[in-house]
């Protein structure tokens, strides 16, 4: 049995907000600036699903991920994050699979995402999980910091 449960939470859930803040701090340190996200950040108005993974033993929130609709058959993965102490445990894969399952239930057969040039760990993760690098899309076109991926779900 996995060490965590994955729960649907509202975007403005305090625990989720804290996880996203930790992610922001980590990315700010990797990029040396707070200006590393092209396009509008996700919000309660445009996030269709927000998941939080919680450690069964401690109750601590350890990972999160979201889906934002791109079109009638596609969505974008946003705010995938795992606290450093839980990396390598499989929780990111569990959250990703739950996002993919939810996407299929919504009729979204294509998932896209953007990660950054200073996140080789994320790039390796998405390639390992079946995502292929694609040309920059949407608000990321022209960004020197973005790397985009896509996966077709069946």
Image: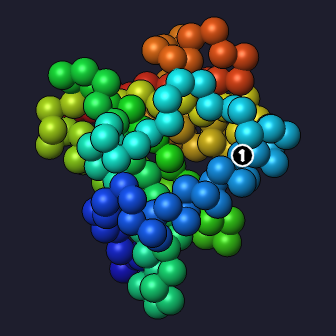
Q: Is residue 24 above or below residue 58?
A: above
Q: Is residue 59 left or right of residue 5?
A: right
Q: Is residue 26 left or right of residue 51?
A: right
Q: Is residue 119 above or below residue 20?
A: above
Percent position of residue 60, x then y:
51, 80
Q: Is residue 127 above or below residue 3?
A: above
Percent position of residue 24, x then y:
65, 50
Q: Does the rendering let one see residue 134?
A: no
Check the image and tell me how it is coloured.
rainbow
At a point 68% along the width and 65% down the height, the residue shown is: 84
At a point 40% along the width and 43% down the height, the residue shown is: 43
- Which quadrant of the figure has residue 148? top right
Query: Which quadrant: the C terminus?
Result: top left
- Could you tell me which secondary element the residue under label 1 belongs to? helix
Give 109 or 127, whichever is nearer the viewer: 109
Q: Residues within 10 Å of mark 1 (few under 14, many from 20)?
A: some
Give the residue pinned by disc 1.
27
Q: Does the rendering let one see residue 103?
A: yes
Give 131 or 68, whichever is nearer the viewer: 68
């Amino acid at each position: 049995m996995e060490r965590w449960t994955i729960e649907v939470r509202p975007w403005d859930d305090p625990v989720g907000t804290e996880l996203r803040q930790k992610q922001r701090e980590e990315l700010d340190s990797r990029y040396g600036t707070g200006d590393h996200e092209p396009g509008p950040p996700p919000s309660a108005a445009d996030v269709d699903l927000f998941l939080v993974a919680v450690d069964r033993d401690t109750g601590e929130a350890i990972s999160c991920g979201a889906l934002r609709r791109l079109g009638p058959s596609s969505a974008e993965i946003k705010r995938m994050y795992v606290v450093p102490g839980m990396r390598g445990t499989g929780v990111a894969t569990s959250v990703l699979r739950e996002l993919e399952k939810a996407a299929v239930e919504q009729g979204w057969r294509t998932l896209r995402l953007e990660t950054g040039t200073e996140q080789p760990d994320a790039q390796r993760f998405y390639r390992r999980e079946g995502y292929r690098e694609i040309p920059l899309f949407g608000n990321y076109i022209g960004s020197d910091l973005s790397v985009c991926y896509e996966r077709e779900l069946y």
